[in-house]
Image: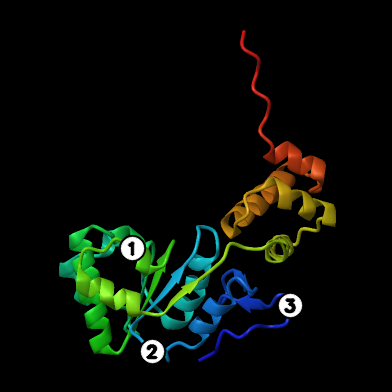
């Protein structure tokens, strides 16, 4: 099975098995190393936590391409469905896992899923905004299991990583932009991977429709809110 080791491209370039690319940087390197170590994890669950837009979902997609794990959300955690939730490799990804806190039914389902996964020799990848020690879980058995599981934090992208992502996203679309455009976007858009993808896609579509190059002036025209008309 192919591993997820870095390919040489400045910060590291990682193919997501035919999907988007993942760039490795200090803020996500530990998470990448843990997923590289799969299936040799020391516990049935691994928690990736960090703020929205830090790349948890993107990195989970890379791992899903290897593990064939289904993607689940809190709404999928039904005790009656637990035996059927694991994928063919006895794995699953659960997004927004922290949202089950205080919901006894879903907590019970996750506890059951954890136990089933452990018995099957599989693994769960749990995504959350913060570490399990800060979740308000009602079931002591579930809390003890998740607090004991490896939990790896991911930081929001720093300047170097976000700049590399923007350059890569434009390159993927075969769009040439100047350094001044990247510099302007760094100070005028939300600092997250999701925002970078949306922004580049929006600029590309607008430039194709207008048949114009993407310049700083064009970015201002497309992205900056228009002045509201004065009240009559």
- Tell me if I can see residue 12 in this picture: yes
The quarter of the picture where residue 196 lies is bottom right
Q: Residue at x 73, y 61 (%)?
A: 163
**N-terminal of the two: label 3 or label 2?**
3
- Along the viewing direction, whichever of 97 and 177 lies nearer the viewer: 97
**N-terminal of the two: label 3 or label 1?**
3
Query: In what quadrant of the picture does the C terminus appear?
Result: top right
Q: Is residue 196 above or below residue 155?
A: above
Q: Which residue is mark 2?
A: 42
Whole-percent x and y of residue 165? 68, 64
Badge 2 density bin: few <14, some 14–19, many ≥20, Cα 10 Å: few
Q: Is residue 225 above or below residue 108?
A: above
Q: Residue at x 27, y 82 (%)?
A: 117
Whole-percent x and y of residue 71? 38, 68
Residue 223 in the figure: left or right of residue 214? left
Q: Which mark is residue 9?
A: 3
Q: Nearer the viewer, mark 3 or mark 2?
A: 2
Q: CA distance from mark 3 to mark 1?
A: 37 Å
Q: Nearer the viewer, mark 2 or mark 1?
A: 1
Q: Return the residue found at the far top.
A: 232
**Secondary structure state at the residue bearing disc 2:** loop
Q: Which residue is mark 1?
A: 135
């Amino acid at each position: 099975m192919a591993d997820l080791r870095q390919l040489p491209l400045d910060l590291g370039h990682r193919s997501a098995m035919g999907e988007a690319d993942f760039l490795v940087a200090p803020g996500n390197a530990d998470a990448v190393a843990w997923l590289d170590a799969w299936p040799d994890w020391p516990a049935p669950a691994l928690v990736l936590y960090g703020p929205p837009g830090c790349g948890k979902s993107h990195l989970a997609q890379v791992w899903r391409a290897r593990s064939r794990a289904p993607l689940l959300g809190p709404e999928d955690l039904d005790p009656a469905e637990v035996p059927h939730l694991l994928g063919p490799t006895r794995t699953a990804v659960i997004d927004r896992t922290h949202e089950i806190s205080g919901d006894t039914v879903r907590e019970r389902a996750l506890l059951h899923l954890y136990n089933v996964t452990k018995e099957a020799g599989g693994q769960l990848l749990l995504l959350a905004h913060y570490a399990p020690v800060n979740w308000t879980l009602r079931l002591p058995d579930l809390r003890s299991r998740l607090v004991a599981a490896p939990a790896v934090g991911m930081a929001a992208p720093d300047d170097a990583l976000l700049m590399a992502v923007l350059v890569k996203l434009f390159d993927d679309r075969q769009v040439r932009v100047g350094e001044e455009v990247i510099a302007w976007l760094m100070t005028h858009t939300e600092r997250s991977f999701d925002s970078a993808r949306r922004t580049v896609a929006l600029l590309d579509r607008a430039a194709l429709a207008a048949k114009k190059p993407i310049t700083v002036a064009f970015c201002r025209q497309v992205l900056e809110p228009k002045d509201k008309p004065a009240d009559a």
